[in-house]
Amino acid sequence: MQIGIDIGGSHIGVGIVNEQGKITTKKEINLCENFKEEINKEEKIRDMIISLIRDILKQIGAPKCVIQKIGIACPGTIQEGMAKDIYNLNIKSLSLKKELEEEFYTQVVIHNDAKCAGVAEKLYGSLQQYEDCVFLCLGTGIGGATFIGNQLLTPKINAGSEYGHMIIQKEGIPCQCGNKGCFEKYASMSAFKKGFIRYFNIGENSQAISSEAILQYLLENKNEKEIQNYIEQYIENLMLGIYNITRIMEPQAICLGGSFVYFHKILYTKLLEKLQEHKYKFRVPEIVLASLGNDAGIIGALYIE
Ligand SMILES: [Zn+2]
């Protein structure tokens, strides 16, 4: 039996994944909004994961020894089984591999979450038919995975495909990575939400207003000039990133995932429309939406080579 784990900015998901890449049993836990500020977060995350796995085993009435492999999709930079610089959770370094191996006596692998989700979309989701393609996870930040000739691009030094930190604005908005003007400061979904709150002057706290409320508002007022301007401004930035990625990697398709999918009604059609206007002179690849949702990280964590 294989168990996949996805550590997101707002929740942790754990699931049993069968040989066809389908999740058969899943358990999730939400990380509350102030989790970021808590102390001993690393220990708490480990405890939550261990108890979620125990719950799943209990539910199906199986002992620990049936687990053949545990795969973890985790944000941040993964080096030697450790996750480093998880900005979303305000964690410098998270060790899970050794602890879970000791607890469950099995092989544990850990990889970057966007790479895992990309692998899942490539094997079982929207990217199956493309040999050269890019997965972009538009969420709190922007993660990426690149496939050339059906192979995930895995450079030796770092994981690469860090499209979120591609600089699209000289001296632009400061980013947690230490640079300014990174793509994710303009085109991630948290940038979209923060910008929305600033643009319409509805308070300071972007956490306080839910995605549901924002989507509702946008849908109800989509014909208002101000809303259209705001969306166009966001799409312009997203398009700039897509242009750069396409000129460098020449993918047949780019798959957009993360919470962007939640806003697809308002953003996806507009993006396709704008790309057809050919403001930038380039061959526009197929732009597809991710189809596995929150399950992608859990599935991909087990199949990434
Ligand atoms: Zn950056």
Image (tube, rainbow, N blue to C red):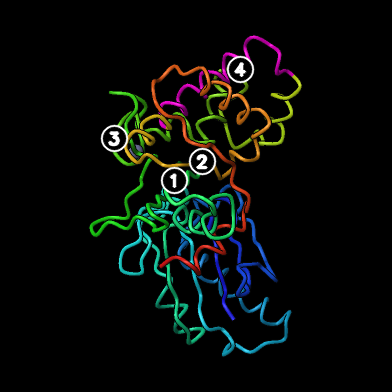
Disc 3 residue: CB within 8 Å of ligand 1: yes
Q: Which residue type carries mark 3?
A: Asn
Q: Mark on residue 138?
A: 2
Residue 177 x, y percent position in the rendering: 32, 41
Residue 87 is marked as none
**What's the mark number on residue 134?**
1
The x and y percentages for residue 65 are 56, 90
> Residue at 57% across / 30% down in the picture?
193
Q: Secondary structure at mark 2?
A: strand
* Nearer to the camera, 289 or 225: 289
- In the picture, the quarter occupied by the N terminus is bottom right
Q: CA distance from mark 4 to mark 2?
A: 22 Å
Residue 223 is covered by the magenta coloring: yes
The part of the chain drawn in magenta is: 221-241
Q: Disc 4 vs disc 1: Cβ atoms closer than 8 Å?
A: no
Observer-nearest of 119 and 33: 119
Tell me the amino acid under the disc marked 4. Answer: Phe
Q: Point out the frontmost of discs 4 and 2.
A: 2
Which residue was labeled with disc 4? Answer: 200
Spatial CA distance of label 4 from label 1 is 33 Å
Q: Earlier in the sequence, mark 4 or mark 2?
A: 2
Q: Nearer the viewer, mark 3 or mark 1?
A: 1
**Residue 17 percent coordinates (x, y):** 61, 71
Sooner in the amino-acid sequence: mark 2 or mark 3 = 2
At 36% from the left edge and 69% from the top edge, which residue is drawn?
A: 81
Q: Is residue 212 left or right of residue 155?
A: right
At label 1, which amino acid type do we have? Val
Above-or-below relation of 20 to 231: below
Tell me the amino acid under the disc marked 2: Leu
Q: Residues within 10 Å of mark 3 (few under 14, many from 20)?
A: some
Q: Are marks 3 and 1 in contact (CB under 8 Å)?
A: no
